[in-house]
Amino acid sequence: MTDPIADFLTRIRNAVKANHKVVEAPGSKIKQEITKILYEQGYILAYKFDTNEQGHPTIKIALKWDAATKSNAIKNLHRVSRPGLRQYASVEKMPRVMNGLGIAILSTSKGIMTDAKARKENVGGEVLCYIY
């Protein structure tokens, strides 16, 4: 696998489109940080970091659904920076997703964070994905 973050986002995207309640994916430190951000921003209901029988880390995510409209909190996940074409943004050119309704997740020198937090801390970095 050449892009594990894209695989992680695709698993979540496919689970949303298939109306699944829980999605499981292989874990890593960067995927755990992305999962924590999704939880803090209210896009997922719960998460659990675990290990499988071979001792490899896994992530279980409970997706958030609105019972009244039967729609998911995540409308779209879009991978921006990829191994073949890295995308970086400075503080001045930080992306605004859906005019502030969505979030961009960045990898900065101070760790993985949202675009709003990166603006607040005045750091730029690699734009990993857009979520709205």
Image (tube, helix red, strand yellow):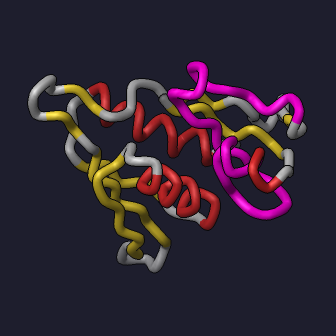
Rendered position, 40 above or below 76: below
**Quarter of image, res 98:** top right
Q: Residue at x 69, y 57 (%)?
A: 112
* Magenta segment includes 93: yes
Q: Residue at x 73, y 28 (%)?
A: 95
Rendered position, 55 above or below 74: below
For the record, the magenta segment spans 92-118
Can you name the residue that lies furthest to the front here? 120
**Quarter of image, res 13:** top left
Can you name the residue that lies furthest to the left here? 68
- What number of labels is visible? 0
Looking at the picture, how far across and down is residue 128, in whole percent? Answer: 69, 40
Q: Nearer the viewer, residue 14 or 110?
A: 110
Looking at the picture, how far across and down is residue 116, in whole percent? Answer: 67, 43
**Quarter of image, res 39:** bottom left
Side (left or right) of 21 relative to 78: left
* Magenta segment includes 39: no
Q: Nearer the viewer, residue 17 or 93?
A: 93
Looking at the picture, how far across and down is residue 60, in whole percent? Answer: 34, 60
Check the picture and name the quadrant holding the N terminus.
top right
Q: Residue at x 61, y 25 (%)?
A: 97
Q: Nearer the viewer, residue 46 or 123?
A: 123
Side (left or right) of 97 relative to 38: right
Looking at the picture, how far across and down is residue 49, in whole percent? Answer: 41, 71
Can you name the residue that lies furthest to the top here? 98
